[in-house]
Image: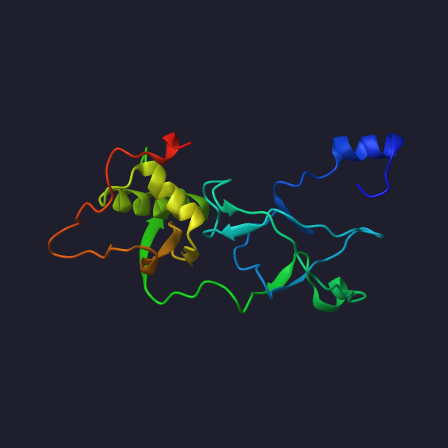
Amino acid sequence: MGQMSGAAGDAAAKEGARTVPGREHGGNCDIKNLSRGSKVYFPVYVKGAGLSMGDIHWSQGDGEITFCGAIEMAGWIDISVDIIKGGIEKYGITNPIFQPSPVEPNYSNYLIFEGVSVDEHTGDQHYLDATIAYRRACLNAVEYLKKFGYTGEQAYMILGTAPVEGRISGIVDIPNACCTVAIPTDIFDFDIRPNKSGPSQSIPTGIDAAECT
């Protein structure tokens, strides 16, 4: 809120845009590729606008599907700032664009789970709904990981904290959207790939992440 005080400060606190969602000017985007060495171009819509940042994550999967499920951390950020005068008009942008970090998790081996825009409870088809398709992909991954001894909560947390790759893989083949979630297999100390023998239970049972303190 900068230097606002009095009635102006009260109005901004009551009516101003909340910081939870991503917005045209940036906001809380939770993009895992915005790490050390990345470069972000923010459109500026308000004269005299400030710049602030926070919510640092040590590790996170695409979508941060567990909402507060990334591995949160304290830290400091060293940044340099330049201004491109008239940049919105020059480049026609309405939302931030960025160059990803050259220093980020780089895995070669993935197991990829597909989901389509069909409700898992009712079987209803939702026309090109990428949100439902991604949810189905994540649920398919959760059910798969449970076969190795993870609880549903533990598998869910893995998708939120590990550097999984989320993709809209198909958005034109009506009526279904197709999304995928790719889990790097090297984060496990056992083989999670399908094989003829079936999954071997590799995680001790009886430990539920939801009950840990």
Q: Residue at point 67% right, 50% down?
A: 53
The residue depicted at 61 percent of the width and 43 percent of the height is 21
Q: Give percent across and percent down for residue 146.
A: 26, 42
Q: Nearer the viewer, residue 117 or 54?
A: 54
Count of marks overlaid on the render? 0
Asked whether the viewer can see residue 77, the reply is yes
Identity of the residue drawn at 11% across and 53% down: 197
Viewport quadrant of the N terminus? top right
Residue 66 lies in quadrant: top left
Quarter of the image with the C terminus is: top left
Identify whether 74 is placed above or below 40.
above
Q: Which of 42 and 134 is in front in this view?
A: 42
Q: Is residue 175 left or right of residue 88?
A: left
Q: What colouring does the structure picture have?
A: rainbow
Q: Position of residue 106 (x, y in %)?
A: 43, 66
Q: Residue placed at 47% from the left, 52% from the top?
A: 62
Horizontal and vertical percent position of residue 56: 58, 50
Q: Is residue 119 visible?
A: no
Camera-nearest residue between 188 and 127: 188
Q: Is residue 16 above or below residue 85?
A: above
Side (left or right) of 6 relative to 213: right
Most extreme residue toward the left, as rendered? 197
**Residue 130, placed above or below residue 20:** below
